[in-house]
Amino acid sequence: MVTHNTEQLVVEAVGLTKVFKDFWMRTKAKAVDSVDLEIRSDEIFGLLGPNGSGKSTIIKMILGLLHKSRGRLLVFGKAPTDVAIKKRIGFLPEESYLYRYLNARETLDYYGKVFGYDRRTRRRRADELLDMVGLTQVAHRAIGEYSKGMTRRIGIAQALINDPDFLILDEPTSGLDPIGTRQVKDLILELGRRGKTILLSSHLLADVEDVCDRMVVLYGGKIRAQGTSSELLTDSSQMIIQTPRLSVETISLIEQLIQREEGKAIEKVTVPRQRLEDLFLDIVERARREQVETAGAMHGGSTAAFLRSDSPVEGEHVIEALVSESQDDKPVRAVEKAVESMPREDEPKQDVLQELTQEKREEPTSRPSVVERQAPEAPKDVDQSIIDSLMGDTRDSDTDDQATRE
């Protein structure tokens, strides 16, 4: 696993401003207004705000899709337009723009090719991601036939195909059912435990509250509040004392004690109840145990093996070799070196080839016929003239055959 310094800044913005102008260069809108923020390595950072508050504009500037108007913006210590940082980023846009005529497996294979992975790695990662997002059963269907929730699931899978160091999720739970929403939040927490840096942009407050370490609240392009969940959500004016169920008499005695000692009264006594999300998931889980059939996306499996903290980083030596080469011809030289260093099983030894070739060249041009090479010595008591006549016939026959063949 690739580890980073905990103090390293993945994103650093100082006075970041983005102004959209019309054809006559007149200001149309100030989408981002003097924003200062830091996203540290290995943290889950939340970008909160209503629609039109500047969340997506900040994300597009981080990705290098939009140029800032003023201020400073660094990603991994470099300008957002630097191509070298792109392989370390995974991005799920607010709307998943995928090829509608490709199926899920072909889609993941395509994005795997973009990052240069070999066929075996692409196939294994696609299988693991499809199982993780619950689309294995519908992997053969074209993306254009998917519902919005299923499209978001495959969008999340494509954002993770390169095992990114910095994952940007823009409204990841939009269109997902409660099962998918819970699964995405569990996935974000798992990736955070692995040490990945995640930027989560959402207007769904509960999603950000459940997973983020720190957050900022935007409105009108400005930061209105920022801090950890505890710093922003702790209500210092009230306190909750939780006990097992008490009788009315006991509650009355406690209230009298509070009035006598603190001069205050109990404002409200309520019975805790479970969250609607927990109830919904419990109902679905019971139905699944009863093996009730459904035509929708299945509940996702475990986190893909290559995304877990116990999985080795693949191909790091290859990446290092490519990076170490010169900028102009690094891919070609790296491939040539790899090919030259590969042993060839069918390559014969050079000295054997030379030996065989030399022997072939030393052979006489005209070979004796088979009869001449194998003819035994005639016995002394046999008439030599008869043998000579027979040999002469054989030579004549060979000559005629050769002439016929020619």
Image (cartoon, rainbow, N blue to C red):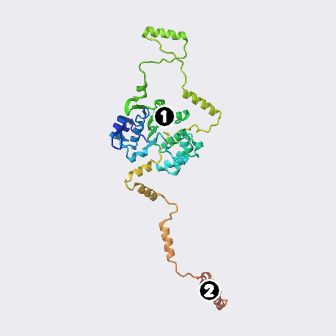
Between the residue at mark 2 and the residue at mark 1, the CA separation in whole angstroms equals 92 Å
- Residue 82: x, y in percent? 37, 46
Q: Which residue is mark 1?
A: 189
116 left or right, relative to 19: right
Q: Quadrant of residue 200?
A: top left
**Amino acid type, residue under disc 2 in the picture:** Asp
- Residue 295: x, y in percent? 62, 39
Which residue shows up at 50% across the image and 42% down it? 155
Find numbered disc 2 in the image and state the secondary structure of the residue it sits on: helix
Q: Which mark is residue 400?
A: 2
- Residue 44: x, y in percent? 44, 34
Between label 2 and label 1, give the one nearer the viewer.
Answer: 1
Q: Residues within 10 Å of mark 1 (few under 14, many from 20)?
A: some
**Amino acid type, residue under disc 1 in the picture:** Leu
- Residue 176: x, y in percent? 53, 36
Q: Is residue 19 above or below residue 368?
A: above
Q: Is residue 270 above or below residue 311?
A: above
Q: Nearer the viewer, residue 137 or 102?
A: 102
Position of the N terminus by quadrant = top left
Mark nearer the N terminus (2 vs 1): 1
Q: Nearer the viewer, residue 138 or 312?
A: 138
Q: Is residue 396 above or below residue 324?
A: below
